Each structure stands twice: as structure tokens, then as C-alpha cells.
């Protein structure tokens, strides 16, 4: 155990039922024992009940957990103090720990130690941070998979194939005197091409994951007064946007995130598109049009009472190239027959809803979830990988392109082997087998304190 002893609250500084303070490093046990009323009760992987004492006075009654290294999160001796969730108590205990020689941990320092002690690789460590910051069921699922080595596994499969190719090339070098060819240039080139397509597939899955984790842009659009803001409020289940029967109520863009079908959606309400009454409305309408062109999914809304108007037709032209869900709102104000007539006249399979009563909402939610499942078919197959991993993959693909052209020009095996080495080195950066200190620092400082 090379490291000094660090400590930090692992829970937020708010009044709550419980708080956790974490200690890690070679003196964890000694430091914790020196402030605990029952040091003899502190046993590996047992909960010890007692009091934290300061000059004989009780600071709080706590549960103390001891994990003897290396079987702990950081790989070092770790103690967790579970005290009552009062920030004043937490800071008193922290001060006692400082007095006994522990120092305040930097953000992410516990996880950094876990990495340096070989408990997790870099992708698994990053997944812990992703898990803490996840905003949807999908992200949580992905983060857990990656915490359990999903990225490490794929990296190791690709790396093994490169190592094998390099071994074949080197065997060719060793036996070059004897004129034995272990793998022909053509065969080797084909293997390199197939590794390249694996890397490209990996990168594509990272990009899909990035898009889905940022949230899929869904925009509510239509004429003024059709009930866009009412629908936004219904989906968010709160009165977020102003609703009124005056056309042109919404002038600004309102954007909120919500989970639909386990995926994060960025939902945007826009100004109704009409002939602008004034400059402000005109700016709002221009913004609406711009937002529509950026969105992945458009929810196009018409008013059941008005049917499909010429203005609706003009507006729908704006969505031509988009994934669109067509909605007739205010179904509570008309009968089923007029809804069917609108569907027949337009040939559009409108979903009828009432933003007022919530009727038809489930069907709309399902339509959005279906588009996500169809258009982002492989999102469940994707990864949450940050810019770091994506840029390593890009560089690795560049190296492979070079290697492929070396095979084509039948370059000396020694030269190709050295390029393959560089490729193995590059791929190893993903899991952090090889990584510079400054890179590690920048990764772990993004974590919260106590993690
Ligand atoms: N009866 C009924 N009234 C609704 C329904 N949805 C919206 N309304 C009413 O229609 C009016 C306009 O609703 P908004 O949500 O403000 O419409 P909007 O499309 O955001 O309008 P702008 O912001 O002006 O573009 C309000 O008076 C709502 O109460 C519905 O499903 N049924
Ligand atoms: Mg509105």
C-alpha cells in the first residue's frame, strides 16, 4: 500500500436520514479506531456499532464498516462511517479525521486508487461516473454493463486479433531465411480489413450511444392555439408552459427533458406558426422553423375542431424529411366520426388525443417509443463512450489504414510489425493499460468528491 490516507463524505451535504464518510489508505483502520468508542468491534466486513468521540464527548452514534485491502473498492484498507445525515455532524467527523492524519480526498481519488490498484480498468472506472450521472433507464443499464466490463471485453477481443496478426507477421520474420510464409500479404491484408471494420463498428456504436445519451430531440409543432403547450405540460406532468386561448401565447422556445420508453427525450415547445402579428412573434416563428429542421422527431399537431386546414398543409411541408407523428388534439370537443373524416380526407393516420383530459396520451407515448426503437435500432447495442475513447478509435483506424497500405505494397514485415505494435499500444489506451498521468488526472477530476 503505497498511498497516504484520504477521507471524504460520499453523500451530499444535506439534512437526510444518513450520511456516509469514506476513508481509504494505509492508516484507515488506525485513524477510524482512534475516534471510535468500540475499536475492538471493528472487524473485516462486519458492521460495528458505536460512537464517534471527540475528547470523550459523543459526536454521533454510527455504524462503522471495515473492508480490509485488497478486498475493498480501492484495493486498500477502507473504512466507511455511516452517521446521521446532518452536514454539521459530517464536518465534525471530517475534522477529527484530519486531526488524526487523514487528508481530504480529491474528486474521484477513491476511484483513481481503485484503477491504480488494478481493481477496475479505465472504462469501468468511467462507467461508475456515468452511472452516477445517468438520467434515463437506458443510460443506467449501459453504465452498469460498462462497469461490468462491456467495453473492456470488446477492446480485448479486438486487441487479441491484432496481437495474433502481429505474431503471424513476426513468425514470418523469424523464418524468413527458410522461405516459409506464415501468412500471405493478401491474407494479412484481409485480416487487417476485418479488424478495421470491427473498430469502425465499435466507433459507430459509441456514436449512437452518445446521441441517445444526449437525448433525442422531439419537437411539438403546429398552428397557434392547437394545444402544443398543453401537450408539453401533459407529457411533463407539470404546468411548465403558459397555456391560453389567445393565439401566439408561446413566443420563446421551451425545452425540457423527460424519459419516454426508458430513453431521454429533449422535448421542445415552439411558437405556433402563423402570419406574425409583431416582430417578437416573427422572431419566435423563425426560431420554431429552425428548431424543426434540427429535430429528430416532430409531433405535428392540428386542432380537431378546425380539421386539416390549408395553413396546416403549409406547415406540414416543413416536416417533409422528418420522422413525424401526426396528432389531432382536442378530441374531447368533437365526435369520433369527425376524427375519422379528417383521417380519410388527408390519408394521414392521426393519433387523436386530448391534451386537456390526457385521453390518447398512452398511444402517443408508444408512437414516440416505437420511432426510437426503429430509427435507433441498435441503440440498445451501443456504448456510452466519451470523446476520449472515440478519438482513440479514430486514431486506431488511421493506423490500420496505414497498415493495410503497407500490406498492399508488400512492405518489410519488420516495418509492418512495428506499426502493429503502435496499434496495440493505441488500443490499450482505452482501458488505461497504458496512459499518461495527466490524462488520468483529467479523467478522475471530473468525478465527484467521495467517489
Ligand atoms: N377542450 C380542449 N381544450 C384544449 C385542449 N388542448 C388545449 N386546449 C386549449 O386550447 C387553448 C390553446 O392551448 P395552448 O396549449 O396554449 O396552445 P398552443 O398551441 O401552445 O398555442 P400557441 O402557444 O399560441 O401557439 C387553451 O385554451 C387550452 O386550454 C384539449 O385537448 N381540449
Ligand atoms: Mg403555446
Image (cartoon, rainbow, N blue to C red):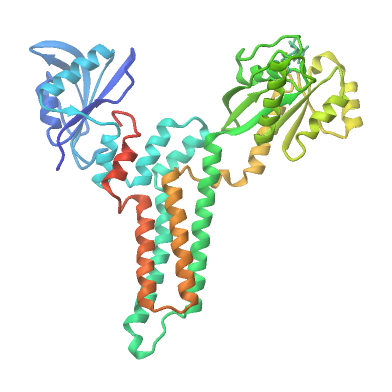
- Write the residue at 48% across / 70% down: 404
The picture places residue 191, in percent across and down from the top left corner, at: 49, 70
Q: Considering the image in quadrants, where does the N terminus appear?
A: top left
- Taking the image as shown, residue 278 lies to the left or right of residue 381, namely right
**Quadrant of ligand 2 in image:** top right
> What residue sits 38% from the left and 68% below the top?
419
**Picture quadrant of residue 339:** top right
Seen in the picture, residue 60 relative to 143 is either above or below; the reply is above
Q: Where's the C terminus, which quadrant?
A: top left
Residue at horizontal 12%, vertical 20%?
Answer: 35
Q: Residue furthest front?
A: 279
- Is 24 located above or below residue 165 in the figure? above
Question: Residue 110 or 185: which is nearer the viewer?
Answer: 185
Apparent side of residue 328 relative to residue 382 in the rendered image (left or right): right
Answer whether residue 230 is visible to the viewer in this image: no
The image quarter containing residue 329 is top right
Is residue 414 something that shows in the picture? yes
443 horizontally vs 307: left or right = left
Q: Position of residue 276 (x, y in %)?
A: 77, 18
Amino acid at each position: 500500500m503505497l498511498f497516504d490516507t484520504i477521507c471524504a463524505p460520499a453523500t451530499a451535504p444535506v439534512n437526510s436520514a444518513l450520511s456516509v464518510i469514506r476513508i481509504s489508505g494505509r492508516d484507515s483502520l488506525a485513524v477510524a479506531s482512534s475516534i471510535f468508542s468500540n475499536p475492538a468491534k471493528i472487524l473485516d466486513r462486519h458492521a460495528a456499532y458505536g460512537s464517534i468521540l471527540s475528547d470523550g464527548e459523543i459526536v454521533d452514534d454510527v455504524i462503522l464498516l471495515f473492508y480490509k485491502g485488497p478486498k475493498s473498492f480501492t484495493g486498500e484498507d477502507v473504512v466507511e462511517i455511516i452517521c446521521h445525515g446532518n452536514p454539521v455532524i459530517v464536518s465534525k467527523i471530517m475534522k477529527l479525521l484530519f486531526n488524526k492524519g487523514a487528508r481530504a480526498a480529491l474528486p474521484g481519488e477513491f476511484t483513481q486508487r481503485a484503477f491504480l490498484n488494478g481493481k477496475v480498468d479505465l472504462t469501468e472506472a468511467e462507467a461508475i461516473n456515468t452511472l452516477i450521472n445517468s438520467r434515463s433507464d437506458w443510460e443506467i443499464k449501459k453504465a452498469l454493463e460498462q462497469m461490468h466490463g462491456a467495453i473492456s471485453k470488446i477492446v480485448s477481443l479486438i486487441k487479441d486479433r491484432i496481437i495474433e496478426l502481429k505474431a503471424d507477421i513476426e513468425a514470418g520474420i523469424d523464418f524468413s531465411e527458410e522461405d516459409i510464409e506464415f501468412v500471405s500479404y493478401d491474407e494479412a491484408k484481409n485480416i487487417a480489413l476485418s479488424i478495421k471494420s470491427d473498430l469502425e463498428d465499435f466507433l459507430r456504436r459509441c456514436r449512437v450511444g452518445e446521441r441517445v445519451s444526449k437525448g433525442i430531440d422531439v419537437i411539438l409543432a403546429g398552428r397557434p392555439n392547437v394545444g402544443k403547450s398543453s401537450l408539453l405540460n401533459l407529457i411533463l406532468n407539470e404546468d411548465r408552459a403558459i397555456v391560453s386561448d389567445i393565439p401566439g401565447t408561446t413566443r420563446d422556445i421551451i425545452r425540457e427533458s423527460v424519459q419516454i420508453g426508458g430513453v431521454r427525450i429533449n422535448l421542445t415547445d415552439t411558437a405556433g406558426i402563423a402570419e406574425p402579428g409583431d416582430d417578437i412573434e416573427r422572431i419566435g416563428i423563425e426560431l420554431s422553423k429552425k428548431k424543426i429542421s434540427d429535430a429528430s422527431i416532430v409531433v405535428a399537431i392540428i386542432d380537431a375542431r378546425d380539421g386539416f386546414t390549408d395553413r396546416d398543409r403549409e406547415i406540414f411541408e416543413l416536416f417533409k424529411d422528418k420522422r413525424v407523428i401526426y396528432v389531432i388534439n382536442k378530441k374531447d370537443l368533437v365526435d369520433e366520426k369527425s376524427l375519422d373524416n379528417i383521417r380519410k380526407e388527408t390519408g394521414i393516420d392521426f393519433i387523436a388525443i386530448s391534451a386537456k383530459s390526457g385521453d390518447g396520451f398512452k398511444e402517443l407515448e408508444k408512437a414516440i417509443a416505437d420511432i426510437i426503437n426503429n430509427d435507433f435500432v441498435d441503440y440498445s447495442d451501443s456504448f456510452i463512450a466519451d470523446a476520449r475513447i472515440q478519438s482513440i478509435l479514430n486514431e486506431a483506424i488511421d493506423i490500420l489504414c496505414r497498415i493495410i497500405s503497407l500490406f498492399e505494397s508488400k512492405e518489410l514485415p519488420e516495418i509492418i510489425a512495428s506499426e502493429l505494435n503502435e496499434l496495440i499500444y493505441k488500443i490499450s489506451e482505452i482501458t488505461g493499460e497504458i496512459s499518461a498521468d495527466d490524462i488520468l488526472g483529467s479523467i478522475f477530476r471530473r468525478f465527484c468528491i467521495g467517489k
